[in-house]
Amino acid sequence: MSDLTRQTLRPGRRWTLAFTVALCVTMSACTIVPQPLDVDAQALKLKAGIDKTIGDEEPVTGPISLYEAMARALKYNLDQKIELADEEFHQKQLDLNSAGMWPTIAASFGQAGRNNEAGSSSKSLLSGRQSLEPSTSSDLDGQTADLTASWDILDFGLSYVRGLQAADEKLISAESRRKVINRIQEDVRTAYWRAVSADRTYKKLVDLEALAQKSLLQTQQLEARRLVPPLTVLSYQRDLLQVQGDVQKLQRELALSKNQLAALINLKPDARFSLVLPDRTDVVPELPGSSDEMFMVGLRFRSELREGGYRARINENEIKASLIRALPSFKAAIGMSYDSNSYLYNDQWKHYSGQLSWNLINLFRYPMQKKSLIAEGKVIEQRQQALTLAVMTQIHVARVRFIRFSQELGTVRSAEEVQEHILELSRGGFKAHTVSQQALVREEMNAILSEIRYDAAYADVQNAYANLYGSMGLDNFNYDVRIDAPIADIAAKLQEHWSERASTLPRMPEPAGNPTL
């Protein structure tokens, strides 16, 4: 055997070769190839998920009232479920941060072994000769175990401050959910009243379109027979086509309102349902209070202002965290250990330690961090002032808007009564052949438009009333919706709230520092 072959077969060379091969195989196995998403499987999964979500809801068994629609939105609307999940997430984050204040307990167990004795010898520093025969003080195989509890006062302080910040983040998520729910409730009220208008006028719009189509065919026959001057016929046809186009536009706009309502209460877009059609009335709610009272309520309950307050507290706690990081840290530890080495005199022992450390870089960085956080606090303060003025402006606009819509409703109601009288006279004139069919079709159209205008005006009043409460940040409900709460119970609570308690504002707090007379 040649020297080269013997060198190749040396044990060290063989181990090197084996390690190289293993390394190459491992690196090739760690190569990641992009895998495109299976869009077909994802589509089926998404479809099954939404079907299950809607299938688990209480079925619609009859006409849906306003308060049932609001209750379904509170319980099933997916946007508010997102906010609810976000609130639960921040609660888990709060729990996690609280656990950071606990002591650290570490447990370990080890198994070690080798193929030959771990021996060593000593060398004299004076003579340079070996002063001790090779000897060992450990077994070929052995086990070790350790259980140690440690606690760092600096980590405790930081975890406490982070816990306070996490608690504020959880409260911010709760305010965000309140804001979303208020918006959803406003949207439900608007979509409901428009959908009511669609249900009320659907048959009349269909009949009117059929009448316009019939009149259009008659004018075409008159034009073919040349019984009427062409200009007169064409003008009549233009008016009828305008009526037909307006009817189709109204049908499209009103039909969409029902689809919007279905989305808000988490029904399928093609779901068929009917609505409770309340009697038309021009009775409107009263203003709950004066401008100053409403301003104070808004400053107390608006979600954006509360969020700003929590952000300011988070900023203040961040300054405290920066100070804590700049302080020295003391870490204490206590534990028990075990070693199976038979050469040890004591194979079990208890140990304890204490360590004081100080990151001096954090000490020098603290003044700069403090200045930065103070500057951020000033930004938050200025934003709060801007929000305060914006909230007061929104309350004022919502108040004026509600008053104007209430006044306009009376005018629209009077106009509808006048149009009803005109329609009655037009129908009588058509029977008496004193009113043309073209004029009758136009008045039929005007009558339906007046009804739709009244429904829209009443919907505007109701929406303005809900917007008035939304501008003050007041909830449309005064209790948390349970997952297992029946829709009927939630609807009854909402109706009780809007019928009895929504007309009064929460009691104002007493000014601090005023002497009692």
Image (cartoon, grey):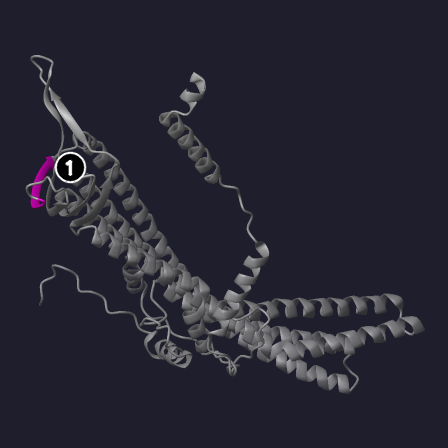
Whether 208 is drawn above or below 94: the answer is below
Q: Which residue is situated farthest in the front direction here?
A: 1
Image quarter where the C terminus lies is: bottom left
At horizontal 38% and vertical 74% (from top left) the residue drawn is: 286
Q: Is residue 85 left or right of residue 219?
A: left
* Tally of numbered tags: 1
Quick one: quadrant of the N terminus? top left
Lateral position of residue 320 relative to residue 307, left or right? left
Q: Which quarter of the picture shows residue 243? A: bottom right
> Could you tell whether 158 is left or right of 470 in the image?
left
Which residue appears at 30% of the width and 49% of the height?
384
Q: Quick one: SS at disc 1? A: loop
Where residue 178 appears, as percent x and y from the top left, is 35, 63
Considering the whole magenta stretch, tell me its main secondary structure. Answer: strand
Q: In which quarter of the image is residue 293?
A: bottom left
Residue located 32% across and 71% down the image: 480
Q: Residue at x 38, y 80 (%)?
A: 489
Residue 381 picture location, percent across and down: 27, 45
Disc 1 marks which amino acid?
Answer: Ser
Q: Does the magenta stretch include residue 349?
A: yes
- The residue where tag 1 is placed is 138
Magenta part of the chain: 347-356
**Percent from the top left, x then y, of residue 151?**
13, 46
Residue 294 position in % (x across, y down): 31, 64
Q: Is residue 336 magenta?
A: no
Kindly tell me whether residue 160 is visible in this rendering. Answer: yes
Question: Which residue ends up furthest to the right in the rendered image?
Answer: 225
| Quarter where residue 382 is shown | top left
Front one among 496 and 366: 366
Rate crowding at label 1 as few (under 14), some (14 to 19) or many (20 or more) other CA atoms within 10 Å.
some
